[in-house]
Amino acid sequence: MRRVVAAAAILACALGLAACGGNGKGNGMGVGGVRSSSSPGSGDTSDAEGSGKRGAPLAGTDPCTLLKPADVPELNKDSTFKPTSSGDTCSGYDFAIRIKDVSKDVYDMDFHGSTVKALPDMAGHRAALSETNVGGLKSCNVVLEVTADELVDVTVTHDVDPPKTCDIAQQAAAVVAGRIPA
């Protein structure tokens, strides 16, 4: 039961973060301003801050290759729950990794939103953190810039020691950042 609640909380956080952006003006964006896979490169990111690099170097990458529970000691290593990939998202017991193509609006929200805290760069990638509480479960999301229109979200919901959730999310994001190709 606890696994279902944790997985639901992670999914709710990921979907909630994605649903906050977008402009809905028919620019090829899907739900929440995240570019659908059928319309790559259709968003305007010319004003996005950060690296200024464009493109999707992680296109076709299995997000489960970016983080294994064994990479971060505090992540749950329950042998009966193996992380699974579904398209651009990898869901583990207490974490999720999502590769997303974004519009300028979503990029700006992820790095400049009212609940966002800037972090030092991780392995040369711009990073920011946001916290949420869903159903009493604390989740922390670290977003990493791959390019101006491709980001990676690392979300952790750690129910064993909630005060450490954001520290664990940052450790996991550092591992992911180190696996993003330069």
Image (tube, rainbow, N blue to C red):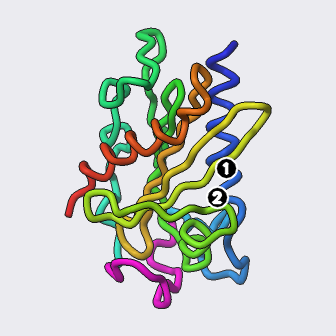
Q: Which residue is located at x 48 percent, y 59 percent?
A: 100
Is 120 covered by the magenta stretch? Answer: no
Camera-side residue: 99 or 156? 156
- Residue 62 is left or right of residue 95, and the answer is left
Question: Which amino acid does the dot numbered 1 rest on?
Answer: Leu
Give the amino acid type for the residue marked by disc 2 in the picture. Answer: Ala
- Report the span colored magenta: 38-53
- Residue drawn at point x = 45 percent, y = 60 percent: 119
Q: Is residue 51 magenta?
A: yes
> Residue 128 location in percent, x, y?
49, 61
Taking 111 as reference, is 54 above or below it? below
Q: Nearer the viewer, residue 56 or 118?
A: 118
Q: Residue pushed farthest right?
A: 135
Q: Residues within 10 Å of mark 1 (few under 14, many from 20)?
A: few
Q: Kindly identify which residue carries mark 2.
A: 18
Element assignment for label 1? helix
Q: Nearer the viewer, residue 108 or 31?
A: 108
